[in-house]
């Protein structure tokens, strides 16, 4: 499901957590400015998650670490997003996982991600 480049803003609806059969979610290049909803951790079948080029802020919810089926994650260009993705790296198949993050000193740390 793609909502990329739609000028969406505000907070992610918590109801997104009910879309448990979803395998791909692209929210990139919008203007979301809230925290990443903890309910995103309920998307257990998610393989592809793109949250890049938004204004997400705060910490990365620990619920995202449960997304063990993820093959692709992009969280680049969310300047106020902080946290550590290492627990997620421990739960995904590193042989197939491709993560993309800004890896500056104060950005989310992700040892299994490509840094830009």
Image (cartoon, helix red, strand yellow):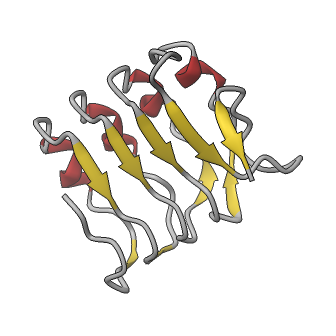
Q: Nearer the viewer, residue 4 or 57?
A: 4
Q: How many labels does the image show?
A: 0
Rendering coords of residue 22 (x, y %): 16, 42
**Left of 25 or right of it: where is 60?**
right
Residue located 50% across and 16% down the image:
95
Residue at 57% x, 71% y is 55
Question: Residue 18: x and y, percent?
Answer: 13, 43
- Which residue is found at the position 37% from the left and 30% from the top? 70
Quarter of the figure with residue 19:
top left
Q: Which residue lies furthest to the bottom in this view?
A: 7
Q: Which of 92 and 14 is in front in this view?
A: 92
Q: Which residue lies furthest to the front in this view?
A: 95
Residue 116 x, y percent position in the rendering: 75, 53
As drawn, is 82 to the left or to the right of 61? right
Q: Quadrant of the N terminus?
A: bottom left
Q: Residue furthest right?
A: 105
In the rendered image, residue 40, in percent from the top left (x then y), is placed at: 33, 42
- Residue 107 drawn above or below residue 4: above
Q: Is residue 67 above or below residue 103?
A: above
Residue occupying the point 74% across, 36% down? 109
């Amino acid at each position: 499901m793609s909502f990329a480049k739609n000028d969406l803003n505000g907070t992610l609806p918590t109801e997104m957590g009910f879309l448990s059969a979803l395998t791909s979610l692209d929210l990139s290049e919008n203007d979301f400015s809230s925290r990443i909803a903890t309910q995103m951790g309920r998307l257990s079948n998610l393989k592809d998650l793109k949250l890049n080029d938004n204004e997400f802020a705060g910490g990365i919810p620990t619920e995202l670490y449960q997304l063990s089926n993820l093959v692709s994650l992009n969280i680049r260009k969310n300047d106020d997003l902080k946290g550590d993705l290492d627990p997620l790296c421990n739960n995904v198949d590193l042989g197939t996982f491709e993560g993309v993050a800004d890896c500056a000193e104060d950005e989310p740390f992700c040892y299994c991600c490509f840094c830009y």
